[in-house]
Amino acid sequence: MSRDRLAWTSALELTRMIRAKEVTALEVTDAVLERIEAVNAALNAFCLVTTDAARAAAREADIAVMKGEPLGLLHGVPISIKDVIFTRGIRTTAGSRLFAQTIPTEDSLAVARLRVAGAVLLGKTNTPELGHKALTDNPLFGATRNPWNRELTPGGSTGGGAAAVASGLGPLALGTDGGGSVRIPAAFCGVFGFKPSYGRVPQHPAFPGWEHVSHIGPIARAVRDAAAMLDAIAGDDARDRESLPDEAGSYLEACDAGVEGLHVAWTPDLGYARVDPVVRTLCEDAAAEFESLGCYVEVVTPDWDNPEADFSMMVSAQFHAAWGDEVDRNEALMDPSLVKFVRRGAAVTARDYLKARTRVEQYWLEVRRFLERFDLLLTPTAAVLPFALGAPVPRDIDGERVSVLGWMPFTYPFNLTGQPAASVPAGWTEDGLPVGLQIVGQRRADRTVLGAAAAYEAARPWIDRRPAV
């Protein structure tokens, strides 16, 4: 198999080939590293490529195969790690000048589990500073570009990981999602992104600021690759008191469950959002596919309040608690939008914060009550198409002025509720830009979401659609 084909091969197929000795892990790693060398300068997806360490890990993987040792689920598979996730011995900057030379002595739990699963770490992918916005640029490494149109943003904050996966720079990326940061870039880059249930993947150690809303999850070109990664990284750990107990069974096996007979709700706007007409049309068509798959699909208009104000208040207050002193000392080194966000949190009183937390609990009860007769909820992933790199976020959608987060109204609500949610490609516009459909599951029903995403992928495969990078 040619190196170019190897770079585009799915993670599960790579593990099969490596186990069968049809290809070596080093050959796979070199193929991906060669493509990174050729493509990354145009995209700025990776902010650090650990070539020597990756090749050394691949050699070790090959030795294990030759010795007949037990092999992990992702043995020999090249994987990228978002630069806010701690990696032992590998620089982790969070896109910040404050941490430009930081080399952790401890892996994030998810990274440690990926190493045990046999994954080969390629390096770190770009992120906004401390992951504070749903775009991908920072003062340390600059902006990441969308592989479908390099004048546009890939979204964020896992924009580097999504751009890498979409461009054949490794089949899997590990990201974080505090308000849409896995699902939005997956939608903007035409790949699959999964935010597991809150606590499904334990988080320790981690940069502070995203308490109660942050999830770690995979970005992949294939749903089953993402499910295999979740099998590797999910499970309880006492170092994260909010981590969920281990579940019996495999997330990969859940992809074979199908969706026939499921009750599915589809809403184009959650009852309050403005949506670009092109996005709405493509997502409506994608949602209709679930009827063809044997689901009972109902168009719904939820009566929930928009939780944007409470989400923004909570996170800005947490960022101020975590980073307010650094802003006072090092404002000139930090992204101006991060400084503004942290300072906004200074105005939030303890009373305001606790009342917002109480309203979020009430919001969850409304969501649960509304969705208790449905297995899945479908929405657009983002309200707009990918927009210009470096431009302000869209504030006018379909002829109406929207709030600051009005372009991403469908993602952050489910960080507040903690439900599992995925983004699958709904389709591409006439100009060749991808649009994402969000699939939201019931509380802790990760398997149902993965099974639905896999069934949809089988009906409308996208893996062979590649950007011209």
Image (cartoon, rainbow, N blue to C red):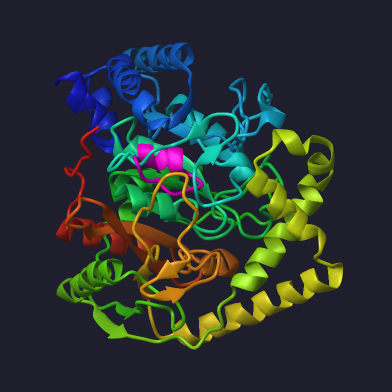
Q: In which quarter of the view is residue 439 placed?
A: bottom left
Q: Quadrant of the N terminus?
A: top left
Percent position (x, y) of residue 175? 49, 43
| Helix, strand or loop: magenta stretch | loop
For the point 51% across and 52% down, which residue is it? 134
User: Any magenta on residue 297?
Assistant: no
Relative placement, left or right, of 400 versus 36 is right
Percent position (x, y) of residue 62? 35, 15
Front-most of 163 and 433?
A: 433
For the point 66% across and 25% down, which residue is it? 100
In this rendering, the answer to whether 23 lies above or below 319 is above
Q: Is residue 249 visible?
A: no
For the point 55% across and 65% down, which residue is it? 404
Relative placement, left or right, of 92 versus 9 is right
In this rendering, the answer to whether 454 lies above or below 323 is below
Front-most of 111 and 327?
A: 327
The mark tally for this picture is 0
Relative placement, left or right, of 274 versus 116 is left
Q: In which quarter of the view is residue 440 placed?
A: bottom left
Q: Is residue 163 visible?
A: yes
Q: Which residues are magenta?
A: 151-163
Percent position (x, y) of residue 195? 47, 56
User: Any magenta on residue 154?
Assistant: yes
Front-most of 324 and 416?
A: 324
Q: In which quarter of the view is residue 300 placed?
A: bottom left
